[in-house]
Image: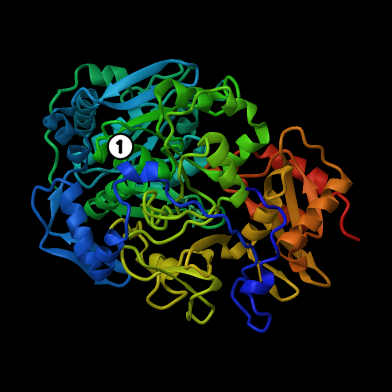
Amino acid sequence: MADADLPSGADTTNPADTNPAIEAYFLEERTFPPSEGFKKDALVTGQSMYDEAAEDYRGFWARQALDLIDWYDEWDTILEWDLPFARWFVGGTLNVAYNCLDRHVANGLGDKVAYYWEGEPGDTRTITYAQLLDEVQKFANVLKGMGVTRGDRVAIYMPMIPELPVAMLACTRIGAAHSVVFGGFSSDALRDRINDAEAKVLVTADGGNRRGAVTALKPAADVALADTPSIEHVVVVQRTKNDVEMVDGRDHWYHDVMKDAFPKCEPERMDSEDLLYLLYTSGTTAKPKGIMHTTGGYLTQVAFTHKYVFDLHPDTDVYWCAADIGWVTGHSYIVYGPLANGATSVMYEGTPDCPDKDRWWSIIEKYGVTILYTAPTAIRTFMKWGTQYPEAHDMSSLRLLGSVGEPINPEAWVWYWEHIGGGSCPVVDTWWQTETGAIMISPLPGATTLKPGSATFPLPGISAEVVDDDAKRVDVGGGYLTLTQPWPAMLRGIYGDPERYRDTYWSRFEGRYFAGDGAKLDDDGYLWLLGRVDDVMNVSGHRVSTTEVESALVDHPSVAEAAVVGAKDETTGQAIIAYVTLRGGQEASPERGEELRKHVAVKIGAIARPKTIIFTDDLPKTRSGKIMRRLLRDVAEGRDLGDTTTLADASVVDEIKKRATTSPTEE
Ligand code: 7RM
């Protein structure tokens, strides 16, 4: 299948006399139609849902809202759209916790497992829907007892333990909005987010387990709490038993306050447009943006996408989204989507290499996981570690794989398909953002013929277009990815800053939502994400996407991962610098570097040939696994590094800096 000698796509897709916003070079010709076996039981196999939605997207979403969600009062108006401000299911009332818990228990599913939870040290908990409902009601009463009421904000700073979804659902039950701050973020990040939201209560834990060590959360929270005047109470879950200080009157152990909590708590009837949560995007330069998600539209679209993109069969599937709940992927696809659909999920506390590099595969084998949803960064890491780890486990329970967070290079896609999916599981590449709330562009696995590396088409009810610098639609080729009509889970704004909302997302192209991604359309109308447009390189006047060069590098059998940046260059404007991680057992050498440079030239054209290849064991990444190309560009241009606080492992940069100054280049 793998074909390293595909002809260059440059001359077929890009006439040299045009000047596109981003050029399209990479040609991937492999296709994977849904198998008959998969189609037999698939929820969607044909085009009719697309057609139905295209005819009337408002009506389509209204039917989904009725089908998937229980409402106390139905809405009067499906959508009020005063660009850029949307209101969905106006006048409708509902409660998210009720939809995620009570209705399933009332339907006789109380004993069904909501979460198989696995702690990193190997301790486990199995939590049924009935147990989760009990816990949520009690914690809702705890919050009420601390003065939290409808409309308040609650900050949550926790490891991946069951009390995290409990705290989120307890908030939704009483109509308070949560603001989950990823447990890996610093005290400063926590403080700024608490203060921006003016949260009344903080829910945290003593610590969490990560790669065999305890990460102390409460001590970090204490530093933040020195400067958060809105916080009245702090609830602390005991997870790791590390030493913590408890401030009298302010700090309370979770197990203490839960002991006497009243077991029943009626869900609040919330308005469809009431704030459900804030989630801050980790901007490295500007003040973080509190992305606002509301209730009815959000729940509708996360339930819809979780059901149809993952072809969910709730009676038989064991679903595992391996993200952190502190990332939007965890909000939508560990908590709200799966619970709204009554799914059984796996939740894992730790890292994939603890105690060994096969931890995920042993979890899949142990619980019989059928659906796995993860990020390209994880897949490329597994490629680097080698196939012996997945091969040591029986993963035949898997039937569907998902990817999210970055463009997935075709070769990583095929590796995932082959070595994790055993050559029989569709891989759904799902494009979306914190701001979109739910999956927007993705295959439907029983209906869509897959192309490795393509997110394929907008989902039913979603409308996306690629445009050029003048906002003119591009039908074939590269440009800016825009969304052209409102969608139910869309952000409702930036907390406290409507103007920034308009400026950031709606000002670049009139009437269109644009949040920074490049994309191209191929001859068959498939969408290929090309990375952030800020990262696009300008080489002798050609606008080259980082994604395509990276994919050409990862296409080489020796490469596991690559990050490419444009660094200032006297002759070409920018020169392409590639940071490359080799697969297990492969040796770095000047010859290997030369071979890779050639490979890129053959694969996509001489213009994209990297000037320099820097071999590195690791790349700087955000906590959700996105490569931080800005940092690599700074290293390549010899600039001082800016803020690196969203880095997963800051030492990676120092290592790369050393190598960058000792690596041979083209000349
Ligand atoms: C869900 C999430 C959003 C940004 C987005 C893209 C990139 C996400 C894909 C992707 C290519 C994908 N939310 N991105 N998914 N790029 N293909 N399937 O990641 O707010 O943290 O990030 O992530 O650049 O704009 S996020």
> Which residue sits at x=23%, y=22%?
131
Q: Which residue is labeled 1 in the image?
A: 168
Residue 291, given in percent of the width and then of the height, sits at 38, 54
Task: Judge by depth and name the residue closer to the eye, 35 or 60.
Answer: 35
**Residue 222 falls left or right of residue 142:** right
Which one is nearer the viewer's eye here, 486 or 217? 486
Left or right, 470 with reference to 235: right
Q: Residue furthest right?
A: 667
Residue 96 in the image, given as x and y percentages of width and height: 21, 42
Which residue is situated farthest in the front direction here?
A: 36
On whether ligand 1 comes within 8 Å of the CB at mark 1, the answer is no
User: Does the image show residue 245?
Assistant: no
Q: Residue at 69% of width from left, 40% of height from top?
A: 618
Q: Residues within 10 Å of mark 1 (few under 14, many from 20)?
A: many
**Relative image position of residue 417 (x, y in whole percent):** 53, 41
58, above or below 232, in the image: below
Classify residue 655 by image quadrant. top right
Q: How is the image coloured?
A: rainbow
Residue 644 % position (x, y)? 62, 46
Q: Secondary structure at mark 1?
A: helix
Vertical order, 181 against 59 (above or below): above
48, 277: nearer the viewer:
48
Q: Quadrant of residue 253?
A: top left
Q: Residue at 11% x, 34% y: name it.
A: 266
Q: Amino acid at mark 1?
A: Met
Vertical placement of 603 versus 477: above or below? above
Q: Is residue 21 left or right of residue 511?
A: right
- Asked if residue 432 shows in the view, the reply is yes
Residue 557 as seen in the image, left or right of residue 64 = right
Q: Residue furthest bottom?
A: 17
Q: How many marks?
A: 1
* Quarter of the image with the C terminus in it: bottom right
